Amino acid sequence: MDQRVHLIIGDGVVARHHQLGKQRSNVVLANWTFPFTGDKFSTYDAIERSKDLLIPHGLYPLQFWRAWDQEELTQICEDKRSEVDGLIIKPFQGSGGSGVIPILEDSSVASAVDESLGEFRVKYGHGLNPYPYTICEKINPRKALWRGNEHNYDIRIYVAREGDQLIPVGCLFRIAPEPDKGTFSKGSLIVNLSGYGGIAIERGLGLSEDTLKTVRLEEEDIEKIFAISTLLMADLARQPIDWKERQ
């Protein structure tokens, strides 16, 4: 808007305007790992690499695949959806659930892929490459009982480093804005607190006895999740990934 900007905070801005990340003389990014952490494949791959440590605490790897173009994406989805209880496709990077689409037994794979790419292009235009796509098996998650309805939710775990120790310092439960009625609507699947016309702080729940009742978890579940998160971070630190190989 013809205004001089002195400071931009937010990796999403760089995702939409890649030229900002290249102008290193006058732009400082807070998170240079964003192109990798924004890759959904990385999470599943990290868990697979560390599964021997994580399975004893109750975390099992999902089946997942990577597709480098539309033809490969469509073919993998056609081949694999009969092996699992549905698939979820996710474009590379992106945010706010843009392009995240479920593929069920009776879904048209071609239509789902077109819908995913269309959502991504509307948000990011043609300047950001949605490939490689990540395909993973769909799970049947435990629901939160929130405001009289069952909602999907996710759990963000915060792990801090103190000296040579990694310590879980808290967690945030993010409740999807719409109830889960089996229709797989975007509002029932995507739990982001922003992107729905403001920041919905009421859907972000901190750890408490009341919250555990809402999300139907026990203290022992949180202990396992804290252990899993800390072990995973420690194992990643011990086994650095070759990022050039990953690209």
Image (cartoon, grey):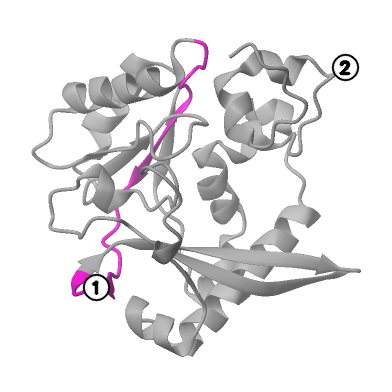
Q: Is residue 222 above or below residue 84?
A: below
Query: Depth check: 170 or 200 in front?
Result: 200
Q: Is residue 23 left or right of residue 61?
A: right
**Residue drawn at 13 percent across, 28 percent down:** 108
**Residue drawn at 47 percent across, 82 percent down:** 221
- Residues packed near mark 1 inside 10 Å, few (<14), some (14 to 19) or many (20 plus): few
Residue 68 visible in the picture: yes
Label 2, label 1: how many angstroms apart (C-alpha)? 49 Å
User: Looking at the picture, which amino acid does disc 1 mark?
Assistant: Arg
Which residue was labeled with disc 2?
25
Q: Is residue 132 above or below residue 230?
A: above
User: Splitting the image into 4 quarters, where does residue 238 fall?
Assistant: bottom right
> Which region of the structure is painted magenta?
127-149
Question: SS for tag 2?
Answer: loop
Residue 98 x, y percent position in the rendering: 38, 33
Q: Is residue 145 left or right of residue 168?
A: left
The C terminus, quarter of image: top right
User: Looking at the picture, which amino acid does disc 2 mark?
Assistant: Ser
User: Splitting the image into 4 quarters, where does residue 182 fall?
Assistant: bottom left
Q: Is residue 137 on the magenta stretch?
A: yes
Which residue was labeled with disc 1?
147
The N terminus, quarter of image: top right
